[in-house]
Image: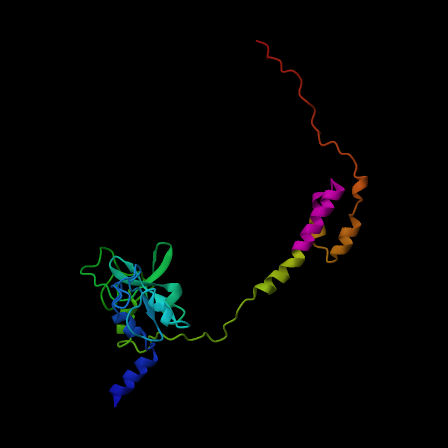
C-alpha cells in the first residue's frame, strides 16, 4: 500500500513531461524532414511529450508550450528563462554561457572533485557552489526519492506583495516638478542665494513658487559674467 502512495506523491511534485524531456534524444537529424537544411532536432513540446522536434515540425505544434534545448560541452542545457516558467529549479546550480543563464538537463559525473571543494552534487558528486545541492534537473529528480520536501511545482509565497511601477512614478513626480520649478527660478533671478534654492524645493505649492520668481523674457537684464580682471604683461623676476 505504501508504494503506490509514494509514487503518486512523487508524480504530484513533478510535471508529466519532465521525465520524457530528460530521456529524449536531441541534435539528431529529423526523420520526417531529413531533406531540409534545418533538420536538427533541438525543440521539445511540453504538451505532446513525444520525441524531439526540428524547426519544421513546429508547424504542427501551434499554441503549444515548446522549449529549445542547447548544447554545452557535449551536454544538453536549457535556459533558465524558459524552464523556470514551468517548474521550480531551486537547489539546482545554474551557469552562464554566452551571456545566458542555463541549467543542465542530466547528471554529469565527476570522478574526482577538485582541491578545496566543500560542496558536491548529492547524486553525481559534481563540484558545486555552497548554495546548491544538485548540478542538473535530472539529479534533482533523483534526489526527490530521498527528500520528500523537494518539488518541481511552483508554490506562491504567502503574503507576497507586488510593486507597481505606476505608483512609484506618481510618487516621484512632485519632487521632479519642485526641482524643475526651482531650476527655472534660478535662471530667471540669475543670482539667488544657494540656501534659497534648497528652500524652493521644499515648497508644497509649486505654482506659487513659479509665480513669485517669474520674469518677462523681454525684460531680461544684461549681465556681465566677466568678474576677474585680465592679467597684464608678465615680468621676469629680478636676479
Judge by depth and name the residue closer to the eye, 185 or 107.
Answer: 107
Spot occupied by residue 68 in the image (x, y as percentages of width and height): 34, 64
Q: Residue furthest bottom?
A: 1
| Quarter location, residue 43 | bottom left
Q: Is residue 40 above or below residue 143?
A: above
Q: Residue furthest left?
A: 111
Q: How many marks?
A: 0
43 lies left or right of 161: left
Q: Is residue 97 above or below residue 154?
A: above
Spot occupied by residue 209 in the image (x, y as percentages of width and height): 76, 52
Judge by depth and name the residue closer to the eye, 62 or 151.
Answer: 62
Judge by depth and name the residue closer to the eye, 206 or 118.
Answer: 206
Q: Is residue 199 visible?
A: no
State how the image is colored. rainbow
Q: Is residue 4 above or below residue 40?
A: below
Q: Residue furthest top?
A: 239
Q: Is residue 47 visible?
A: yes
Q: Quadrant of the N terminus?
A: bottom left
Spot occupied by residue 64 in the image (x, y as percentages of width and height): 39, 73
84 lies left or right of 185: left
Q: Quadrant of the C terminus?
A: top right
What residue is shown at x 24% (from left), y 56% (from top)? 116
What residue is shown at x 52% (from left), y 71% (from top)? 161
| Quarter location, residue 207 | bottom right
What residue is shown at x 31% (from left), y 80% (from top)? 11
85 lies left or right of 161: left
Magenta: main secondary structure = helix
Task: Please report the bounds of the magenta region as a residue range.
Answer: 176-195
| Quarter location, residue 237 | top right
Q: Is residue 197 magenta?
A: no
Q: Is residue 191 magenta?
A: yes
Spot occupied by residue 159 in the image (x, y as percentages of width and height): 50, 75
Amino acid at each position: 500500500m505504501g508504494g503506490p502512495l509514494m509514487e503518486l506523491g512523487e508524480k504530484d511534485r513533478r510535471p508529466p513531461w519532465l521525465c520524457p524531456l530528460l530521456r529524449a534524444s536531441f541534435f539528431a537529424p529529423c526523420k520526417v524532414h531529413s531533406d531540409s537544411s534545418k533538420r536538427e532536432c533541438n525543440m521539445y513540446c511540453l504538451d505532446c511529450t513525444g520525441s524531439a522536434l526540428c524547426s519544421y515540425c513546429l508547424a504542427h505544434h501551434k499554441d503549444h508550450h515548446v522549449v529549445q534545448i542547447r548544447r554545452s560541452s557535449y551536454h544538453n542545457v536549457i535556459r533558465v528563462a524558459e524552464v523556470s516558467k514551468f517548474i521550480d529549479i531551486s537547489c539546482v546550480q545554474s551557469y552562464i554561457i554566452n551571456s545566458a543563464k542555463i541549467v543542465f538537463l542530466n547528471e554529469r559525473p565527476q570522478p574526482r572533485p577538485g582541491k578545496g571543494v566543500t560542496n558536491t552534487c548529492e547524486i553525481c558528486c559534481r563540484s558545486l557552489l555552497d548554495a546548491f545541492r544538485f548540478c542538473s534537473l535530472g539529479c534533482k529528480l533523483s534526489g526527490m526519492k530521498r527528500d520528500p520536501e523537494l518539488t518541481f511545482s511552483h508554490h506562491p509565497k504567502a503574503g507576497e506583495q507586488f510593486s507597481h511601477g505606476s505608483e512609484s512614478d506618481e510618487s516621484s513626480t512632485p519632487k521632479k516638478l519642485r526641482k524643475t520649478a526651482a531650476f527655472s527660478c534660478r535662471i530667471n533671478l540669475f543670482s539667488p542665494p544657494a540656501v534659497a534654492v534648497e528652500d524652493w524645493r521644499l515648497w508644497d505649492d509649486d505654482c506659487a513658487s513659479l509665480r513669485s520668481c517669474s520674469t518677462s523674457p523681454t525684460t531680461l537684464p544684461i549681465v556681465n559674467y566677466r568678474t576677474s580682471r585680465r592679467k597684464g604683461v608678465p615680468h621676469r623676476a629680478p636676479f
